[in-house]
Image (cartoon, rainbow, N blue to C red):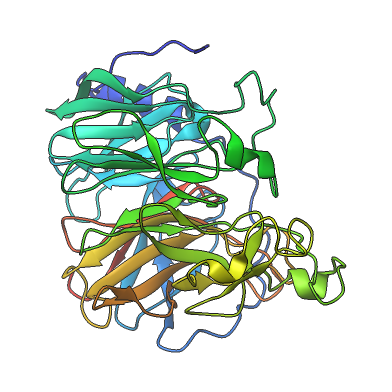
Amino acid sequence: MRVCLRRNAIRVVAGLGAVALVLSCQRAPERPASPPAPPAPPAPAGLAAAPLRVAPEFASAPFDQPREALIPPGWSIAVWARMPKPRLAAWAPDGALLVSVPSAGQVARLEPGGPGAEPARSTLLDGLDEPHGLAFAGDELYVAESDQIDVYTYRDGAATNRRTLVAGLPNAKSPDLRGAYAHALKSVVVAADGTVYFSIGSTGNISAEDRDADPPRATIMRVPPGGGRAEPFAVGVRNGTGLAIAPDGAVWTAVNNRDNVADPRTGEVYMAYVNDHPPESVARLTPGRDLGWPYCNPDGGPAGLPLIPDEQTNPDNSRLDCAALPPIEQSLGAHAAPLGMSFVTGVLPEPYASGALVGVHGSWNREPPREPQVAFFPWRDGELGDAQTLVGGFQYADGSRWGRPVAAVAGPDGAIYITDDYADAIYRLAPPGR
């Protein structure tokens, strides 16, 4: 049952005074001043340190002191907008950037201004239950709330005519879960033929009962073109927040895998093993595919990872035959926390012309912490190559951070727009001349 009221789409059309009022109400509270920046780690191969450009109106913490990002040489990066806790993003047909803000129950609309100008921001949708995933199919906007998937008609900068595609999805308000839901946020994508795919995360770290729930959790679900009953498309997907359609139409997911796994050689949990196990899965999905969770974990990498039995949930391989499952196509380091995923084709210069962008949030339970970054996987002949860092530098050598990317999407201007819910910012990453 819904406990918050849905309000109609909001579009700011009043005078400058009203616009200023709306924007000031939505700005994040002022942060305390940032401490001095510690030394930065070495730059990955192919990247160079570049100053993060920050306009005076955006220069509150963490941008109250100079920051540097690691980006391809000759590229530039700037703070394009500040807003509280931006998550996933999608470009609308009218050239506006839509950004989900699940913590506020909102979807924001940012209309680009001229070169170097702050975008005009308004609230497109409000009063939603943790809206997260956003996707377009023509003028139809799909919004993944924590408890349902909705479709809106998007025209003239407004979202109207709400229809619920799937209702009754599990979240922390579900009576049977009694508030215990660690991965309630959902993602959504739409294939060229109108098929809708959305994620349902697991309730916990190794909650095996999720596989038998109705609807099953730890899944990627599929709704056929034109609507109909949602059915599992892939299972054993602990938290497939990264969800994207590849250039060849295949569905890919980037998965947050389990924490605190035991070493199968000893049966014990200790940091030296947990630090690098299991890797985060980046997988191409096919109907009925099982990624193994919570009984099997990917091992090795970075590509073609076999699945091995989980020592705590499947020590004798009797719950699920891990060797019978196909290898995981690609990976990121353990606890990297991949979030938003998108594909780019023909937007960026080589060697980034075709591939997948993944916002990597960075670890919370690893020593030293896994660095946040925007990762790039090159796309060749229907496969993703090994990950490389496109944007780094968010973490210092001592493990402290000034930013944590969530998602990266290509804009109509040929730049990449990156959301960061830690720094309350959206960055614009631009190749030379853009």
How far across and down, in percent of the image, does residue 387 sit?
44, 76
Q: Residue most toward the bottom?
A: 45
Vertical position of residue 169 compared to residue 40: above or below = above
Q: Residue at x 51, y 36 (%)?
A: 28
Location of residue 167 in the rendering, given as x and y in whole percent from the top left corner = 41, 22
Q: Examine the image and state in which quarter residue 187 appears.
A: top left
Nearer to me, 225 or 252: 225
Residue 68 appears left or right of 310: left
Q: Nearer the viewer, residue 125 or 344?
A: 344
Q: Is residue 418 visible?
A: no
Q: Quadrant of residue 109?
A: top left
Q: How many marks?
A: 0
Q: Quadrant of residue 337?
A: bottom right
x and y percent of residue 121 in the render? 30, 35
Position of residue 38 relative to residue 150, above or below, is below
Q: Residue at x 76, y 65 (%)?
A: 316
Residue at the extreme front of the image, as rendered: 318
Quarter of the image with the C terminus in it: bottom left
